[in-house]
Image (cartoon, grey):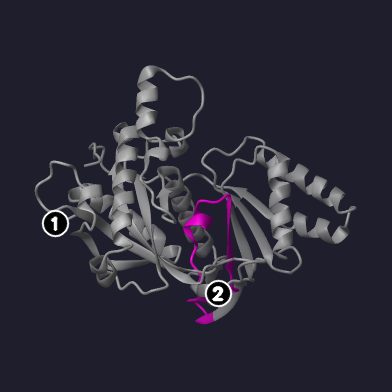
Amino acid sequence: MAGETGPTAEIANQVSTQLLKWFRWSRFPLKDRNFDCLKPEKHARANKKQKHTHPTDVVFSYHDPYLNRKILFNTDLKSYAKSSISGPNVRGALRSLATTIDCARASAEWKGRYEVEDRDEIRGLLFVYNHDAEFDADFERYFAPARKKSKEEEQEEAAADVGGIPLEANQLIHIIQPRTIVYMQTILNDVAKLHLSGTFPKTNYYFYYPDQKLHKVHLERQKRPATVESICGPYLIVGHDAVVSYDEQTQTSKQSFGEGFVVYYNRPGATHLEFMYLFDVLSACQLLDGEKQIRLRVAHNSPDPQVVSNFRRAVKAFVHDWGFDEYIQSKLDAIELEVLDQQKQSFSQTKLGWE
């Protein structure tokens, strides 16, 4: 019996698979499988007579370059129109996912089916796709207290209170929400354009992770995935090898672009301080010390109208802080800045609910 059926799951299934493959996530071939609940007295309704089970739409995984272990995501795929999203629906999906992970972490059936080893970690993932491309709010609105609200709004948001989600100790659930999906689609569209222009390779790219004091980076660099934390973070650093293009007329290959880094920035750039912090990150990662080209691509859903001016102001302020160092000046001046158009993909206008 499937965890989700029909076009609702299929749309989200296709989108998630296409997107996450480029970010070097693996997808287990099985989909829409249920497994037996180990704690029916805790997870099932009191009056439920038939055997209680938990759904697994699909399982994605990657090897975390810092933790040096495989992370498996029991994924709940949702696809909906703008009119279908509500606080109670968010809460219901997260509650169901929390109980599912509670059992999956102890289930021999789940671990055997998805080939889990002792060091592996099982997490939950709620992947929420807006198929009519009309939803433009942020999911934080369902969890964060703000202005005084009407009675109806309070009832809706109380139902989505993240504090009411039954998470167990050391249990993690991640949310890839519509805005994050649009950000990921924008990156893939931009990468495709750069590839066609001969300035980005098709396969020889990698996600950059600096060594940290408590965590060293594992895996060969081109096998490192973009972790869920980096995808949902303020920036994503993508390194690439030199680009080699094939000339069909001369039937020869030649280098069309050198090694470099593309930094996708998921913040509005509303102040110059944002970019000064980013320059600090690039400097700490020693990316400003080499000869590789750095391209900064603002991929936020609502970039500030003064984003370019704020970037230029940040360059001046950063150089000033470095005592007008000419080397730093040359490195920052060489950074190419571009603000990208958002890429939204829409499907049928039919309302797809949260069954």
**What residue is disc 2 on?**
218
Q: Badge 2, how many Cα within 10 Å: few under 14, some, many 20+?
A: some
Q: Judging from the image, what secondary structure is the residue with disc 1 in?
A: loop
Q: Residue furthest front?
A: 41
Residue nearer the viewer, 55 or 101: 101
Whole-percent x and y of residue 210?
A: 64, 66
Q: Badge 1, how many Cα within 10 Å: few under 14, some, many 20+?
A: few
- Sequence-wise, the earlier of marks 1 and 2 is 1
Residue at point 37%, 46% (across, down): 345
Location of residue 38 by image quarter: bottom left
Residue nearer the viewer, 282 or 336: 282
Question: Which image quadrant: the N terminus?
Answer: bottom left
Residue kind at label 2, given as amino acid type? His
Left or right of 343: which side holds 12? left
Q: Is residue 291 visible?
A: yes
Residue at point 44%, 52% (across, down): 185
Whole-percent x and y of residue 201?
A: 52, 69
Q: Residue 213 carries which label?
A: none
Whole-percent x and y of residue 306?
A: 67, 36
Residue kind at label 1, given as amino acid type? Met
Residue 240 in the magenta stretch? The answer is yes
Whole-percent x and y of residue 243?
A: 57, 72
Q: Is residue 3 visible?
A: no
Numbered range of the magenta stretch:
224-252
**What residue is disc 1 on?**
1
Question: Which image quadrant: the C terminus?
Answer: top left
Residue at point 30%, 61% (across, down): 104
Residue 140 in the magenta stretch? The answer is no
